[in-house]
Image (cartoon, rainbow, N blue to C red):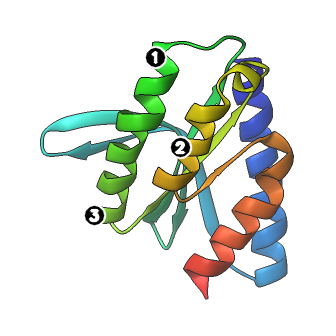
């Protein structure tokens, strides 16, 4: 939860700066639930423009490897990305931790399946470029 709090604070900072520099009103919500086909999914965060969801955010920090990580990056996140795209939104995944050193193959494969994935240090550049792509 420490990593999640740090990422969510950084996202708020990035959004405030972006909103001011582009003169746009973006809204940010922590822990937003989306519904699709009767199924609910709680996102770690969500970004809205004109009251419309434009980016759903998932945040994870891994200290070890495991099958849960593989399941998330090979099935759950691609499914979530497809759901968000069908709603006219994007998925941003922020992930980090020493567990990724062990799971290089999983993260490499994730980059082929998931459009917007980054670590904490790439977050500002990734989120800014994604916002520019969506809003221009």
Q: Position of residue 103 (x, y in %)?
A: 64, 25
Which residue is pictured at 19% across the width and 35% down the height?
Answer: 39
Residue at 82% x, 57% y: name it. 124
Question: Sequence order check: which comes first, mark 3 or mark 2?
Answer: 3
> Does 101 sit above or below residue 32?
above
- The reply to whether callout 3 and callout 2 are in contact (CB within 8 Å) is no
Mark number displayed over residue 86: 3
Q: Nearer the viewer, mark 1 or mark 3?
A: 1
Can you identify the residue that label 2 sits on?
109
Q: Earlier in the sequence, mark 1 or mark 3?
A: 1
Provide the secondary structure element on which disc 1 rests: helix
| Mark 3 element type | helix
Vertically, is 87 above or below 4?
A: below
Q: Is residue 60 above or below residue 19?
A: above
- Residue lying at 51% horizontally and 22% vertically, measured from the top left: 69
Quadrant, the N terminus: top right
**Can you see residue 45?**
no
Q: Nearer the viewer, residue 134 or 104?
A: 104
Location of residue 20 (image quadrant): bottom right
Disc 3 packing (10 Å; few <14; some 14–19; many ≥20): few
Per the rendering, the mark at residue 52 is: none
Residue 4 visible in the picture: yes
**In this rendering, which labeled residue sits more in front, label 3 or label 2?**
2
Estimate the spatial distance between the alpha carbons at disc 1 and disc 3, rounded to whole Å.
25 Å
Quadrant the C terminus occupies: bottom right
What residue is shown with label 1?
A: 68
Q: Is residue 94 left or right of residue 2?
A: left
Q: Is residue 76 left or right of residue 68?
A: left
Residue 31: image x %, image y %? 51, 34
Q: CA distance from mark 3 to mark 2?
A: 23 Å
| Residue contact between numbered discs 1 and 2, judged by CB atoms under 8 Å | no
């Amino acid at each position: 939860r420490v990593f999640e709090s740090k990422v969510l604070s950084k996202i708020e900072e990035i959004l405030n700066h972006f909103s001011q520099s582009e003169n746009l009103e973006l809204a940010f919500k922590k822990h937003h639930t989306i519904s699709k086909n009767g199924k609910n999914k709680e996102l770690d965060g969500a970004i809205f423009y004109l009251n419309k969801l434009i980016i759903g955010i998932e945040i994870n920090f891994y200290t070890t490897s495991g099958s849960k990580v593989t399941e998330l990056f090979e099935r759950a996140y691609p499914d979530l990305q497809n759901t968000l795209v069908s709603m006219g939104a994007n998925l941003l995944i922020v992930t980090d931790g020493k567990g990724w050193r062990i799971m290089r193959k999983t993260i490499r494969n994730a980059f082929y399946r998931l459009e917007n994935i980054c670590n904490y240090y790439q977050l500002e550049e990734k989120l800014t470029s994604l916002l520019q792509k969506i809003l221009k």
